Amino acid sequence: MKRAALSGAGLVLALVILSPYLVMVFTALKPESELRVAPPRLTPVHWQLANFVDVLADPDFQAWLRVSLVVALASTVIVVLAATPAAYYTARHRFRGRSAFLLLVLITQMFSPTALVVGLYRQFFELDLVNTYAALILTNAAFNLAFAVWILRAFFASIPREIEEAAAVDGCGQLRALVQVVLPLSLPAMVTVVIFSFIAAWNEYIVALTLMTDPSRKPLTLGITSYVTAYVQHWNHLFTASLIAIVPVVVLFALIERHLVGGLTAGSVK
Amino acid sequence: MGRRGRWQPLLWLGPSLTLIAAVVVYPAAALVSASLTRYSITGLSQGSVGIRNYGRLLEQAALPTVVANTALWVTAVVALTIVISLALAQLLNERFPGRRLVRWALIVPWAASLIMTAKLFAWIYDYYFGILNHVLISLHVIAAPRDWLGDDATVLCAMIALGVFVSLPFTTYVLLAGLQSIPGEVYEAARVDGASPWRRYWSVTLPLLRPALLVATVLNAIYVFNSFPIVWTLNDRNPGFGHDTMITYMYKIAFKSALRDVGLAAALGVVNVLVILLAVLVYLSTVSWREAEA
């Protein structure tokens, strides 16, 4: 009886959370003529699946998608390359400056680029890097570094040292011990890091809005807003494009949900 | 583990340190330096002006409204989010058929791009064609459609509602992790003592949940203060700065309004950074993050 009541409450909750996104799905499937009708209808009269074909075939959309993929993938690679050695070294060694380093990483995590955006713009303006992928990729990488350090460090620390020490006897250097012994064991942590930093960069908005003014270099988050402006009102295409961007990311996020809290709170809540 | 020189940590931490220096420390320095400089409308430096930008910031007519908006925005979103999330976490801490489904549903607003969710709500809130007015009229909650995003009385509420909606997943997950770290024996003992469920929650669960509540509150306060896409999108029809927060006001001064005043925006940027640093200090003093170390 109690379980049935809980299930009922859970179902209502899930429905409330998902209902705005149902509006997104239904609007994405409406033909243009059904968008501006009063009173509004929730579901389409004619289900226009072709909206997805239209958006996917739109050269602008393809360009935004390419930019988003390039930026998210490249910044994820940088995050992994930078965070792995730092996470490993801080997990295995005590040394002067270790706490200072971890504190610095924690502070960068608190500072989304939003507060620094005027400084970021000045910097890239002076370095003549406005409208370059490098600027966007590096900024995303820097601000997603902390999550990766926390997740990897906690995982490396849970691997018994003896396994590496056995490798060290074989004359393996520390770097080789990391690459050949520790990393193969760390696949779950690595997957979490890769998915998280990919999604964070994929969803990033304000830095792209500030730096990427060239229309051919806009990522999806920026590009899709041009479906609805003061002059055109393609809400259906806006939401079709949004769904294409959101659905894969939700699936990936679901895979790592159990590890998110640990990485976002630097392990202070478990 | 073998010999190592003083330089060895630098080698391993080097890539991370370089990245942080190049894209966090450098722009922070650029921000401070810009706040002490006068710029032309095209962004060219016209020399140092000392702290005059800060003085001009205080003279801006919009500043009191913007600060009040920010305080209301952060307080309301964080408080409502925490209260609702406490209930959601309690529900998800129980075992029932369909719990996985609820957890997955909760992930959607978290994983989805904020700008896309904000656009979605702009459409839902729409005066003529938005589904919200239609639903509320059908339910006789309101008699006539309302212009949620155009009416000064409702636009901030509309933003706060969305702010809460997107903050729920993270907060619920943090509080759920906190609940799951409370050992079952504690409840057992309270039950043996004959405490009512409400009494158990109030005097057993909530005190033990304190660390998770602190983390959730401070981190949310920082996220919500920093939040840009929601305020930016839901307020984009309204002229002036009547519904801006310190973050969107800064952005408009720098890049969008007729002002285009980088020095002035940078001064506000420095203030914003200081506000966040203050929250970080609170976080560090309440959270024993060092204990989580190996």
Image (cartoon, rainbow, N blue to C red):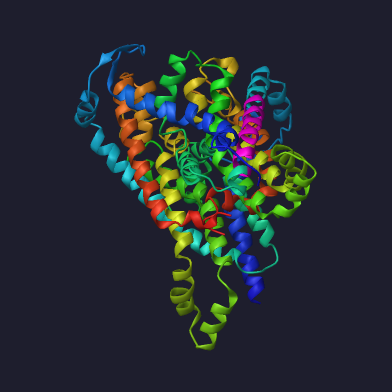
Left or right: residue A12 versus residue A210 is right
Q: Identify the residue at horizontal 50%, vertical 16% (top origin).
A: A130
As displayed, is residue B75 above or below residue A55? below
| Quadrant in which the N terminus of chain A is drawn | bottom right
- Residue A122's x, y, as percent? 41, 20
Asked which quadrant contains residue B260, the reply is top left
Left or right: residue A171 versus residue B242 is right
Left or right: residue B12 versus residue B249 is right
Q: Nearer the viewer, residue A17 or A176?
A: A176
Q: Nearer the viewer, residue A173 or A212?
A: A173
The answer to whether residue B229 is visible is yes
Residue interval drawn in magenta? A69-88
Q: Taken as a whole, is the magenta stretch helix, strand or loop?
A: helix
The answer to whether residue A36 is visible is no
Q: Is residue B139 magenta?
A: no
As displayed, is residue B65 above or below residue B100? above
